[in-house]
Image (tube, rainbow, N blue to C red):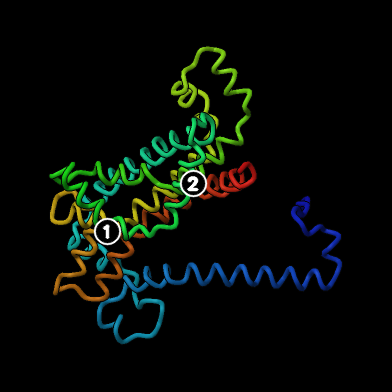
């Protein structure tokens, strides 16, 4: 079998040095240790879900005595989380679309159009990153209840359409695009809005993917705003449903372990599907930005 050549900072010739081999081995060990620390809690929670309550409280072993899915199916029926998965999917989908569309348009204005006063607006956007989000939750909730009296996903979508970090990411990426392409679209008679949708957005796939993954993870994990707006309705998301489930007096620790596994499954699946795009596009954005 043909040996695959080594790529990266350490060349094949460098591996002849004992000090390089020792340092390389230490880095591999450190990476494996970091992976173990990151993955072990997830594995422990998943394995603990297979245990009955008595075994969970008395056994010190990580592995359960049996791997029966009966406990998981029982907890699934108790939580009734299937409908909440659909609610979270609707909430996440709208949040991702708004995060890309609205933040992208603001970033387009700051990074390409640059109207008069754009530097002041950009500084104010960056300044908002220093303000804790919990400070604005009260006025945000008051305004939402005035604009949307009934339960709806729209406030959750719009909250991700105004994110300072996403705006800065878009603006920095748009500034790296070739100016000749923008000028050519103007010569061809495209309006600024047409240039954004037909030229800029198709060329911005790397940053759109990065923002979409960030927004997806944040929208799925969001608890406070969905809790304030959707609790007690048919629209509550997975995180709100798990909180209500945890407050029931008949629920034990083992049931909570299994319910947490239900909340972890979608992000893990999405990570394995999009991990290549995430790493490649993050590196691309870092180089271009």
Residue 47 image position (x, y, % from top left): 37, 71
Comparing 267 with 154, the one in front is 154
Quadrant in the rendering for residue 100: top left
Q: Is residue 169 left or right of residue 287?
A: left
Q: Is residue 112 left or right of residue 124?
A: right
Residue 53 image position (x, y, % from top left): 25, 79
Q: In this view, does 115 lie to the left or right of 53?
A: right
- Which mark is first along the chain, 1 or 2? 2
Q: In this view, does 268 lie above or below 163?
A: below
Residue at image mark 2: 123
Comparing 18 with 196, the one in front is 196
Q: Which residue is drawn at 82% across and 64% down?
A: 15
Picture disc at residue 144? none
Q: Which residue is drawn at 84% across and 62% down?
A: 14
Residue at image mark 1: 224
Number of marks in the rendered image:
2
Q: Which residue is drawn at 27% across and 59% down?
A: 224
Comparing 35 with 243, the one in front is 243
Q: Which residue is drawn at 44% across and 57% down?
A: 130
Q: Is residue 179 above or below residue 124?
A: above
Residue 1 image position (x, y, % from top left): 76, 52
Residue 275 image position (x, y, % from top left): 52, 50
Comparing 171 with 232, the one in front is 171
Q: What element carries label 1?
A: helix
């Amino acid at each position: 079998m043909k040996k695959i050549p080594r790529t990266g900072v350490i060349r094949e010739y460098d591996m002849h040095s004992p000090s390089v081999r020792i340092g390389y081995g230490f880095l591999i060990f450190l990476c494996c240790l970091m992976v173990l620390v990151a993955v072990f809690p997830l594995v422990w929670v998943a394995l603990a879900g297979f245990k009955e309550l008595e075994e969970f409280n008395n056994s010190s072993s990580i592995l359960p005595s049996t791997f029966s899915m009966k406990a998981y199916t029982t907890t699934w029926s108790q939580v009734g989380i299937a409908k909440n998965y659909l609610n979270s999917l609707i909430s996440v989908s709208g949040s991702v679309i708004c995060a890309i569309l609205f933040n992208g348009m603001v970033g387009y204005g700051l990074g390409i159009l640059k109207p008069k006063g754009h530097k002041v607006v950009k500084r104010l956007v960056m300044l908002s990153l220093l303000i804790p989000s919990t400070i604005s939750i009260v006025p945000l909730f008051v305004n939402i209840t005035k604009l949307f009296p009934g339960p709806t996903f729209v406030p959750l979508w719009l909250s991700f359409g105004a994110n300072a970090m996403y705006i800065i990411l878009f603006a920095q990426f748009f500034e790296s695009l070739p100016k000749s392409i923008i000028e050519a679209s103007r010569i061809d008679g495209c309006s600024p809005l047409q240039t954004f949708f037909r030229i800029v957005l198709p060329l911005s796939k790397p940053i759109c993917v990065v923002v979409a993954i960030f927004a997806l993870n944040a929208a799925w994990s969001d608890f406070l705003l969905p809790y304030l707006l959707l609790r007690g309705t048919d629209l509550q998301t997975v995180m709100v449903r798990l909180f209500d489930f945890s407050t029931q007096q008949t629920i034990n620790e083992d049931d909570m372990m299994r319910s947490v596994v239900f909340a972890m499954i979608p992000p893990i699946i999405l990570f394995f599907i999009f991990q290549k795009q995430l790493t490649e596009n993050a590196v691309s954005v870092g180089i271009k930005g």
